[in-house]
Image (tube, grey):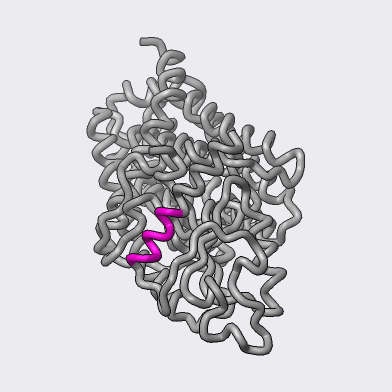
Amino acid sequence: MSPILYGLLFLVVAPIFGGLLAGADRIVSARMQGRVGPPLLQPFYDVGKLFQKEARHVNPVVEPLLLGHVGFMAAAGAMAVGGTDLIFTAFVFALAALCLVLAAGSVNSPYSFAGAERELIVLLASEPFFILMLAAICKVTGASTYAGVLASPELVALQLPGVLLAFLFVATIKLRKSPFDISTSHHPHQELVSGLTSDMSGRLLAYVELAHWYESALLCAFVVLFFNWSVPLGLLAFAIAYGLEVLVDNSTSRAKWQLVLRSTWAVTLLFTGGNVLALFLLAR
Amino acid sequence: MSLFARSPWILHYDGSSCNGCDIEVLACLTPLYDVERFGVVNTGNPKHADILLVTGSVNERNIEIIENLYRQMPSPKVVVAVGACACSGGIFARAYNIQGGIDKVIPVDVYVPGCAARPESIIDGVVQGIAALEHKRRRTA
C-alpha cells in the first residue's frame, strides 16, 4: 500500500481510535476511583450531542481557528504516516496547537485568556522535545519518513531509551493529564484550569475534542516509531504508556506552570540531550 | 435513546442553600451512585451545560447570577430545582432577603422535593430533566 493511502487511512481511523481511547480512559479512571464509569462509546455520544447543540459564537474568528486546529492536527498525523518528512510534521503539529491558543486567546473572557496563556506555556514546554525527538529518531535510523523508520534495522527504543522516557514525561502534557493539564483539565475538576475551552460551546467544543482524538492517535504513531520492528509491539507499548498516564493522572495533583516548564525542559535536556550526546560519543 | 439522553452535562449552582442538598448532589458522583455511568458530567461551565441544577433559594444578591448562568447556557437547556428551598424557598422562605424558589427568576422544568433531597430523587429529577431536554430539542429542531 502506498504511503499516501496510509495517510488517508489515518484521517478515517484516527478519530475512531482516539474516541475509543478516550472512552477506555474514562472507564479505567472510574475503576481506579472505585466507580463503574460511562460506556466505552461515551465520548462519541458527547461529541454527537455537542454537534446537535447550539454553538454560541463569541466572535467570528473562533470557529475558523478551531477548524484550523482540527485540520492541522489531522494533517500532521496524515502527513507523518503518509510519508512526509517527520520533522516537518512536528511543525504542523505545533501549528495545530497554536490555532487552539489563538482561538481561546481571541475571546474577551479572562478565564479563556488565562487558559490560552497556560496552553502557550505548555506548548513552550513540550514543542522543543518533539522536534528533538523526531530529529534523534531520524538520525539513528538514517531515515526521514515514517515508512523509512519502520523499515530501519535499528530498534529505535534500544538506541534512544532516554528519549522514550522523556516522551512518556512530555506526553502527559499532550494527553491533558494531571499534573500537567494546567490549561485544560478533564471533568469533574472545576477550576480556572479548564479555561481554554470556557467560551466554546456546541460544535466549537466538539472540534476541540475531535482534534484531541487525532492528537492521541498521532502520539500513538510516535510511540510505534520507537518500536519500529513491529507495529503490534508499538501499540502494546502505547497501551502500557497510556495506562501509566491514567495512573499518574489519578494520583497526582496539578502542578504550577513554573514546575511544568522547568521539569519538562530539564527532562528534555537531560534524557533527550544526554541520550543523543551518549550516542554521539559512542559512535566516535 | 437520543444523544442528549446519553450525555447530559450538568451545571450545579448553589443559591442560598444550607449545603445539605449540595452534599447530596456531590454524593451522586461518588462510587455509591456514580452518575457518570449515564454519561452525566459535572461541568462547572454554563456554556458546556445542558441541565442547570440549582440548590437553595433565590436571594437579593444571586438573582443576577442565576439569570446570567441561565442566559449563558446554549439551547436546548433545562432547569432542575433540587430541594425544598430551590422549589419554594423552603425553611428560609420568609427570611428578609429571600425571594422564594428558583422559578421566581428563571423557568424551572423539574422540581425535586426533599430537605435535603435524596441522591436517588436527584438522579430521578435529572432523568426527568433529560426527557424535558429531549422535548425541547424536538420542538426547536
Residue B62 painted magenta: no
**B118 left or right, relative to A96:** left
- How far across and how far down the image is residue A222, in percent? 40, 36
The residue nearer to you, when weighing B66 against A127, is: B66
Residue at the image point whose x is 54% and y is 33% from the top: A73
Q: Quadrant of the N terminus of chain A?
A: top left
Q: Is residue A205 above or below residue A125?
A: above
Looking at the image, which residue sits at the far bottom?
B96
* Secondary structure mostly taken by the magenta-highlighted segment of the chain: helix
Q: Quadrant of the C terminus of chain A?
A: top left
- How far across and how far down the image is residue B130, in percent? 45, 50
**A40 left or right, relative to A196:** left
Q: Is residue B118 above or below residue A119?
A: below
- Residue A68 visible (yes or no): yes
Q: Is residue A67 above or below residue A37?
A: above
Residue at the image point whose x is 72% and y is 69% from the top: B64
What range of the chain is rendered magenta?
B120-128
